């Protein structure tokens, strides 16, 4: 590893297998901790050799994994401005390895490996959207990346590098939230009775491909103005054997799919762009619903997406919340409503963007008289069901957090499509009764929280415990790891399914599926962890019989040697802190790297009890917070609607 290799705080935390807070604490407490050698005040970079030397001098154990060595090698190969190109080059090489492994074996043994590699890799990856500069990486680093692929596989290896890249450039890159991307994929998936392989999906602003990844069975098309991002997106899709074509270029100015009509268009476009091409695109035929104002670039993207959808095709696009009500865009919003193109507006939680669902009208089709408004501030769990019910019967009031609004009632001087403005007002008596009920429940729940505090006491000095890894526990026969299926139909059948959402909330199994010999049945004492849950969800199962759901891992333990709640606590911490991230997806836990202390079983059970109490407190807090948010909303609705009055 070269002397130019650098790490950020997250890299150091992974290297030392601690949380980021520990690294911040080291910087404050130890005067001899290495000083930054680059980066910014908010995201400093440190010399890898200096950090390794400091860790050794201070007795901190650390392990440089193959993935970390490859990542640091990439960072040391050029400045941060070229980091994306370096990651793209590594990805193209991994695609070559996937497609022609025998060629690499021959190249690696040749007298001129670099020259032969460039020729062979270029021939094997000719379908990438931009030419690859193979000279960016030297042959030693290619060999290291090949070792990483041999250990984990080309796709997980590249996802690790992508995750590191996104983390390092989080302020410059815009990545769609994983839960929102999953919702968009479910809503925009193939229509009932239509095979996934017969579906064409387009993302005209695809970034690094996040919205296209779930559509592995479809024909996938994408365009991205950044050549680097286009290359990363293409590699991610092609490593999954997706029928993908990615084009580099600005979709609004240089449409790479002119004349194409996709079954589904998904998009998370750039927001608030002034230089989107207003002057040169004034007479563009895509502006079927009106010329987008100069400051409303998002309405240009909406119309571009509709123009690329087939008649009857669906568009799912993220929009800034202000786009629902900004005055300059009211004419286009009105025309979208009159034509029946805009079908739903969904307010997403945590101050996120809105999700607009549109459908390209078919010739001669009579527009619907209703549009769906959904305020999903409390969560996304019911949005899909609400949308499906609305599609089945647009005239009926849907279940869940949505309501239908007559289009004619929206065509006023503002054409305000903000869902919060169109929440239904409750009848006076019902509103007052519901507010009183929620008020009493919240008061009781809040008062009982003090009794839910876990029995944990502070130590005068931090306790240093000998540790092992789950990988070592597996080799010793103490833990067996099982993986849930990547996909599973969880809407029908008679077998209960524990889903990732159940795991996060601590609720009972909520899915249902039909019997299958490949299903994994849970036993009491099993530990289940979410593979891609940002909260780092992990729990010990108390009741047997349910089926392990998709995207979950199961750890079956020898209960005579390992306490399940003890293991669940350390898995939960590892996922939440990101200390042992693995490769695909966000915040995945690499189970075999998770460290757990070596303790007698009796002491494990004490820790397990404390972890269980913390999880119970977390569940109580989540439920109380949801109740409090509901109380606040009912209070505003009641005061504004005249159903409640102040006490004094």
Image: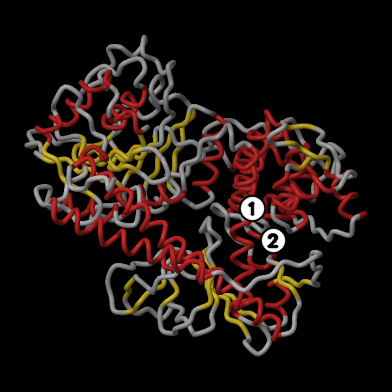
Q: Which residue is mark 2?
A: 151
- Element type where label 2 sits in the image: helix
Q: Is residue 163 left or right of residue 425?
A: right
What separation in Å lies between label 2 and label 1 (alpha carbons)?
A: 9 Å
Classed neighbour count for the residue bearing mark 2: other residues with Cα under 10 Å, few (<14), some (14–19), many (≥20): few
Q: Which residue is mark 1?
A: 157
- Residue at left offset 25%, top offset 52%: 401
Residue 620 in the image, given as x and y percentages of width and height:
45, 66
Task: Decide which of 166, 648 is in the foreground and name it.
Answer: 648
Q: Residue furthest front?
A: 648
State whether residue 97 is above or below residue 279.
below
Residue 137 in the image, given as x and y percentages of width and height:
74, 37
Q: Which mark is residue 378?
A: none
Residue 484 in the image, given as x and y percentages of width and height:
48, 70
Quadrant where the C terminus is found in the figure: top left
**In which quarter of the view is residue 130 placed?**
top right
Quadrant where the N terminus is found in the figure: top right
Res 49 seen here: no
- Residue at left offset 23%, top offset 37%: 421
Q: Label 1 near label 2: C-beta < 8 Å?
A: yes
State whether residue 398 is above or below residue 333.
below
Residue 124 in the image, given as x and y percentages of width and height:
59, 43
Please report whichever mark, 2 or 1, sits nearer to the chain's N-terminal start.
2
Classed neighbour count for the residue bearing mark 1: other residues with Cα under 10 Å, few (<14), some (14–19), many (≥20): many
Q: Is residue 299 left or right of residue 172?
A: left
Q: Residue furthest bottom?
A: 560
**In which quarter of the view is residue 227 placed?**
top right
């Amino acid at each position: 590893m070269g002397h130019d290799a650098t790490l950020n705080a997250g890299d150091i935390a992974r290297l030392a297998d601690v949380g980021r807070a520990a690294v911040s604490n080291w910087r404050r407490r130890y005067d001899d901790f290495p000083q930054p050698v680059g980066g910014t005040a908010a995201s400093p970079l440190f010399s890898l050799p200096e950090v390794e030397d400091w860790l050794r001098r201070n007795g901190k154990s650390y392990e440089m994994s193959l993935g970390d060595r490859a990542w640091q090698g990439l960072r040391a190969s050029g400045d941060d401005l070229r980091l994306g190109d370096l990651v793209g080059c590594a990805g193209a090489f991994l695609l070559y390895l996937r497609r022609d492994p025998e060629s690499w074996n021959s190249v690696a043994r040749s007298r001129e490996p670099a020259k032969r590699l460039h020729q062979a890799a270029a021939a094997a990856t000719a379908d990438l959207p931009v030419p690859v500069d193979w000279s960016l990486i030297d042959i030693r680093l290619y060999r290291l990346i090949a070792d990483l692929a041999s250990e984990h596989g080309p796709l997980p290896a590249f996802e690790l590098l992508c995750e590191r890249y996104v983390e390092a450039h989080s302020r410059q890159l815009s990545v769609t939230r994983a839960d929102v991307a999953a919702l968009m994929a479910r809503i925009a998936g193939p229509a009932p009775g239509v095979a996934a392989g017969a579906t064409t999906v387009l993302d005209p602003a695809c970034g690094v491909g996040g919205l296209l990844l779930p559509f592995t069975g479809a024909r996938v098309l994408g365009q991205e103005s950044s050549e680097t991002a286009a290359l990363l997106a293409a590699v991610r899709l092609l490593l999954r054997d997706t029928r993908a074509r990615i084009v580099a270029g600005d979709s609004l100015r240089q449409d790479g799919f002119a004349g194409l009509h996709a079954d589904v268009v998904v998009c998370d476009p750039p927001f608030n762009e002034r230089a989107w091409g207003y002057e040169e695109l004034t007479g563009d035929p895509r502006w079927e619903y009106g010329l987008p104002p100069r400051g409303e670039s998002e309405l240009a993207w909406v119309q571009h997406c509709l123009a690329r959808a087939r008649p009857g095709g669906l568009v799912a696009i993220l929009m800034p919340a202000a786009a629902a009500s900004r005055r300059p865009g009211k004419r286009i919003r009105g025309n979208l409503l009159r034509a029946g193109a805009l079908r739903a507006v969904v307010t997403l939680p945590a101050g996120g963007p809105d999700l607009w669902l549109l459908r390209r009208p078919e010739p001669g089709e009579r527009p619907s008289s209703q549009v769906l408004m959904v305020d999903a501030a409390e969560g996304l769990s019911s949005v899909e069901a609400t949308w499906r019910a609305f599609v089945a019967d647009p005239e009926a009031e849907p279940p869940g957090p949505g309501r239908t609004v007559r289009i004619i009632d929206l065509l006023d001087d503002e054409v305000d499509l903000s869902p919060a403005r169109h929440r239904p007002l409750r009848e006076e008596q019902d509103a007052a009764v519901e507010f009183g009920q929620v008020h009493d429940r919240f008061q009781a729940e809040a008062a009982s929280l003090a009794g839910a505090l876990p029995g944990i006491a502070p130590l005068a000095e931090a306790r240093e415990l000998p540790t092992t890894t789950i990988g070592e526990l597996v080799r010793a026969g103490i833990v067996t790891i099982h993986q849930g299926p990547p996909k599973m139909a969880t809407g029908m059948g008679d077998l209960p399914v524990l889903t990732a959402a159940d795991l996060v909330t601590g609720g009972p199994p909520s899915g249902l599926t039909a019997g299958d010999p490949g299903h994994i049945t849970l036993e009491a004492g099993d530990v289940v962890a979410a593979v891609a849950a940002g909260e780092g969800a992990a729990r010990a199962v108390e009741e047997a019989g349910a089926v392990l759901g998709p995207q979950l891992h199961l750890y079956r333990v020898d209960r005579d040697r390992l306490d399940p709640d003890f293991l669940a606590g350390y898995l939960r911490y590892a996922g939440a802190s990101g200390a042992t991230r693995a490769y695909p997806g966000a915040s995945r836990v690499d189970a075999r790297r998770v460290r757990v202390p070596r303790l007698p079983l009796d002491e494990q059970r004490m820790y397990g009890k404390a972890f269980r109490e913390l999880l119970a407190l977390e569940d109580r807090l989540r439920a109380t917070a949801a109740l409090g948010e509901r109380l606040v909303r009912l209070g505003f609705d009641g005061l504004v609607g005249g159903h409640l009055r102040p006490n004094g």
